[in-house]
Amino acid sequence: MRVIWLHCVEDPVEQLMKRPSPNGRRFVRRIASLLYDVIIWENRKIGDIGNDCLVSIDGTDCKIPYQLNSGCPEAFYTHKHNGSGLRYELGICILTGAIVWLMGPFPCGDWPDVECFRFAVKQMLEDDERVEAGDGSLGEDPVSAKVPGSVVHQHDDKQLCIRGIVRRRHETANKRIKQFECVNTVFRHDLSFHGDGFKACAVLTQLSIENGHP
């Protein structure tokens, strides 16, 4: 019955969070706990044809209430929303469009994209493997990343077209996660619960991709 309810309700994560009893949030945590069973780093190799870049990596920022009482509100500042936010690093398989990496949350002001990248996913890359990333990771180009602003990589029309497709596919996955209200609007719940909420949204998004909604 719970699976049927998740399929039918427009925004199941937000509806569960709003429940006055602890059962709703407990269920969200259970969905989030599936993260490493559903979002699998090794799945970036599915369909691999020998490219050096298998994944696109970029950060996505979520709005939270202004952190005036945090002692250091600028640590959370994000220029994308001109306010406080939490950042998550998302990795999308270039060939399949599957979500294969998620790390966070990070306070936006203290954790620019390049620091998020260096924190974990850089250590996961194999020898001679790189990622497609935004210009926020320019400091890792060309050794670990390829970014649009690079002066090292090819920028002929064909390469630009391919890399544009990769970026649009990444943005599509990002938008699908942001369809859930709890990560698309200012978070109105206990902030310590934000990570579980985002992970639950990502798990449900990846399951929908796997089940015929790429």
Image (cartoon, rainbow, N blue to C red):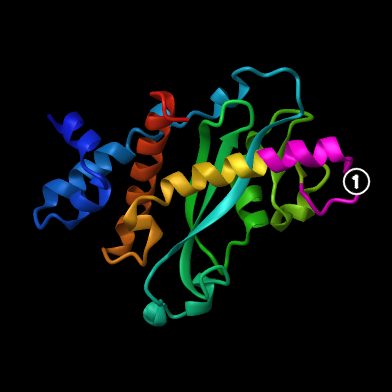
Please name the residue shown 40% across and 82% down the image: 68
Q: Is residue 38 magenta?
A: no
Left of 90 or right of it: where is 36?
A: left
Q: Pointer 1: what residue? A: 152
Which percent across, then down, holds residue 57?
62, 44
Which percent across, then down, holds residue 142?
83, 44
Left of 31 or right of it: where is 155?
A: right
Assess disc 1: are there few (<14), some (14-19) or many (≥20) residues with their C-alpha within 10 Å of its C-alpha.
few
Query: Residue 112, can we see it?
Result: yes
Indicate whether 155 appears above or below 209. Answer: below
Depth order, front residue of 155/110:
155
Which percent across, then down, holds residue 118?
66, 49
Please name the residue shown 32% across and 63% down the image: 191
Which percent across, then down, holds residue 83?
48, 75
Indicate whether 110 appears above or below 34. Answer: below
Q: Quadrant of the N terminus?
A: top left
Amino acid carrying mark 1 in the image: Val
Please name the residue shown 56% across and 69% down the image: 109
The magenta stretch is 147-165
Q: Quadrant of residue 5?
A: top left
Left of 197 or right of it: where is 100?
A: right
Indicate whether 171 appears above or below 194. Answer: above
Please name the residue shown 21% across and 37% down the image: 8
Q: Secondary structure at mark 1?
A: loop
